[in-house]
Image: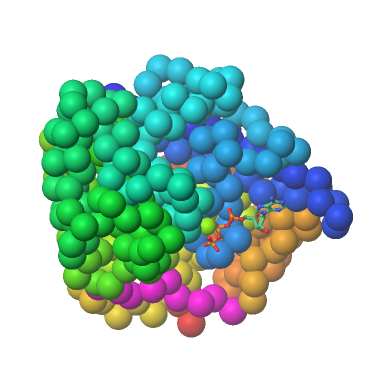
Amino acid sequence: MNVLDVQDLRVSMDTARGTAHIVNGLDLSVAAGETVAVVGESGSGKSVSVTALLGLLPGHARVSGRAEFDGRDLLAMSEAQLRTVRGNGIGTVFQDPMTSLNPVLTVGRQVGEGLLAHRAVTSKRAARERAAELLADVGLPDPRGTLDRYPHELSGGMRQRVGIAIALAGSPKLLIADEATTALDVTVQAQILELVARLQSEHGTGVVWITHDLGVVAGIADRVLVMYAGRCVEDGSVEEVFSAPAHPYTRGLLGSLPSLRDPGEDLVAIPGTPPPPTDLPPGCVFHPRCPVRGDVRCATEQPPLVPVGRTHRAATFCTTPEVDS
Ligand SMILES: Nc1ncnc2c1ncn2[C@@H]1O[C@H](COP(=O)(O)OP(=O)(O)OP(=O)(O)O)[C@@H](O)[C@H]1O
Ligand SMILES: [Mg+2]
């Protein structure tokens, strides 16, 4: 059963330079207990996509599509309904935790409130105990002392871990993590990934994990979705996509990856830059940078996302594997 089912998500915004087509028909499903990694270069629309699902985009953003969570369409919900879902059902961790932490409440209050709201505990005292445990779980060195501190008294990495503790406190059905562990050192990161895996096996939490770190993708994800210019250009099981990437863009990203056993390996830089969302090229969005593009078709026709394997899809006219230069 899918925890999240997104169909044809589109986001556009009017800007000084014209209409920005930021997300252009994204499908994304996450089954219970499954981890889907979303990868793609900076600006490909990863954060805007998940922000749209949570109803947190600026008011002038135009959003369309369907996004079923727990049987209800997130994109059709009122602000009040969304607030309930965000606090109870979907846990989120963003790269900048200051945006999700309340500056005037102690850490203990904030973690404890989540626990009480989800009825994980029934008394304030139990909430405090459990909050301290959660802070220890995310690797904070002085969990008890941290309960009485305010967000501004913590380092960036500590705040990030508090944000993760809050997101996990309610044992959400869906966890959306956007570069959640990028700023943390590898041992703390490993500890957090383990904690998320435990949550998944205990509660069947579905996870959307946005990252640039292919070691993390290989280590935690079941499936991977590659985004380019607001589209999914390839998706499939990690095994399928990593062992036989079908899209020239994915092949470029994985191109000089010496070994998936090397944690911390980043996506590779591909020559050129992604097109600005105000000026998307006709045809295949990747064709201006593509090392194997054909002549007319790639420049005029948009390749549909089609099956290339059992659970593997790609949107390209150029699936022959011998690309890497
Ligand atoms: N409020 C906004 N108004 C106009 N354009 C925006 C707005 N927010 C984001 N964009 C544009 O949308 C595109 C996608 O941005 P997004 O933040 O989703 O990228 P991303 O894939 O998360 O990149 P990164 O890996 O750097 O986090 C970018 O071109 C960005 O400039
Ligand atoms: Mg982002």
Q: Residue furthest top?
A: 71
Is 264 one of the magenta-colored residues?
yes
Against 15, is 204 above or below? above
Against 228, is 4 above or below? above
Q: Is residue 104 shown to the viewer in this render?
A: yes
| Percent x, y of residue 144 | 17, 54
Q: Is residue 280 left or right of residue 25?
A: right
State which region is magenta: 263-271
| Percent x, y of residue 105 | 40, 45
- What residue lies at 24% left-to-right and 71% top-to-bottom? 186
| Percent x, y of residue 131 | 20, 43
Quadrant containing the N terminus in the rendered view: top left
- What residue lies at 58% left-to-right and 20% top-to-bottom? 78
Is 227 one of the magenta-colored residues?
no
- What residue lies at 58% left-to-right and 39% top-to-bottom? 56
Q: Main secondary structure of the magenta part?
A: loop
Against 323, is 160 above or below? above
| Percent x, y of residue 203 | 18, 32
